[in-house]
Image (tube, rainbow, N blue to C red):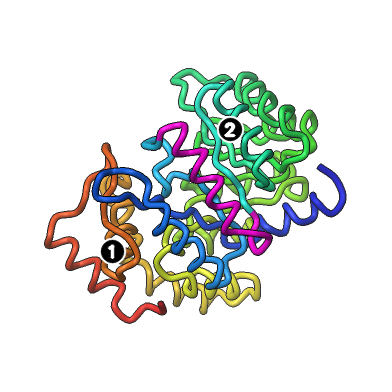
Amino acid sequence: MTGRGLDAARNALADVVAIPVTPFTADDTVDTTAHRALLRRLIDGGVRTLTPNGNTGEYYALTPDERRAVTETTVEEAAGRACVLAGVGLEVPTAVASAEHARRVGASMVMVHQPVHPYVSQDGWIDYHRRIADAVPELGVVPYVRDPELTGETLAELGELCPNVVGVKYAVPDAARFAAFARDAGLERFVWVAGLAEMYAPSYFAVGATGFTSGLVNVAPALSLEMLEALRAGDHASAMAVFERIRPFEELRAARRSADNVTVVKEALAALGHCRRDVRPPSHVLPEAVRAEVAALIAGWPA
């Protein structure tokens, strides 16, 4: 990846990186009609970077065929109006095949989920990502870093080996660790995306991030974009005003180690009439009392 493609990829990451939900029908299949409508709503709302098969999209609950279909639908709806950063992962052959599929159907980049193997060495982490990056040299590659033991020097080595590793989705909940990690890896070498969404974006932007992921954006694109605009302008007060407005909703998602992270978003979308509330195990729909709480929290949010 060189030239204009590299510049476009870097610009797409320095933005609100939306993680769309995957809506389901009453018979537990992917609701393609609702999915397309939700994607159009994001794009029409000003979102320019979409990650199909992210965690808010219930990546680990989808079948291989469903993951491919979700990527294809997203690329079709993006239609040049938004960049598609497709989530890939699991064992190396599956991750490589998913990346190659994303390339064939027109995605611009792939986000590599944190390896789920219980034993991950630093050198093995490099090998895993290098196998994927080397398979799709035309695509930007974005590691999803959730491991606090990973070192910045390890990422720097991967960047030297794979020039198409253009950015990092950093999701360790420690702004000081992020600041050190980014500088050890190369602050200017990669685009740094705050991978813990709006609640961590202000602190991560202060030390080097230029984009942030969002699941909340499914519900209220205008609020996520308002925070981005404030952070880009260095307007800390305005960014924190958005923070306070969304804080109860995001804290509900984060409770009990994020047990209801996706469920709360889908409940909000159901309250707005955009899709069903259904999620797949190990997630679970909310009890009635909490459903009412979600509806009250989003009352008055921009459509």
- Which residue is identified by label 1? 270
Q: Is residue 35 visible?
A: yes
The secondary element bearing badge 2 is classed as: helix
Q: Please name the residue shown 39% across and 66% down the image.
A: 219
Q: Is residue 241 above or below residue 156?
A: below
Which mark sits nearer the N-terminus, 1 or 2? Answer: 2
- Which residue is identified by label 2? 98
- The magenta segment: 63-83
Q: Please name the residue shown 61% across and 48% down the image.
A: 85
User: Where in the figure is residue 266, as x and y percent of width and height?
Assistant: 32, 57
Image check: 255 left or right of 50? left
Q: Is residue 294 above or below residue 57?
A: below
Q: Is residue 261 visible?
A: no
Mark 2: few, some, or many residues within 10 Å (few <14, many ≥20)? many
Q: Please name the residue shown 31% across and 73% down the image.
A: 298
**Looking at the magenta stretch, what is its main secondary structure?**
helix
The answer to whether marks 1 and 2 mark residues whose Cβ atoms lie closer than 8 Å is no
Q: Tell me, for residue 38, which label it has, or none.
A: none
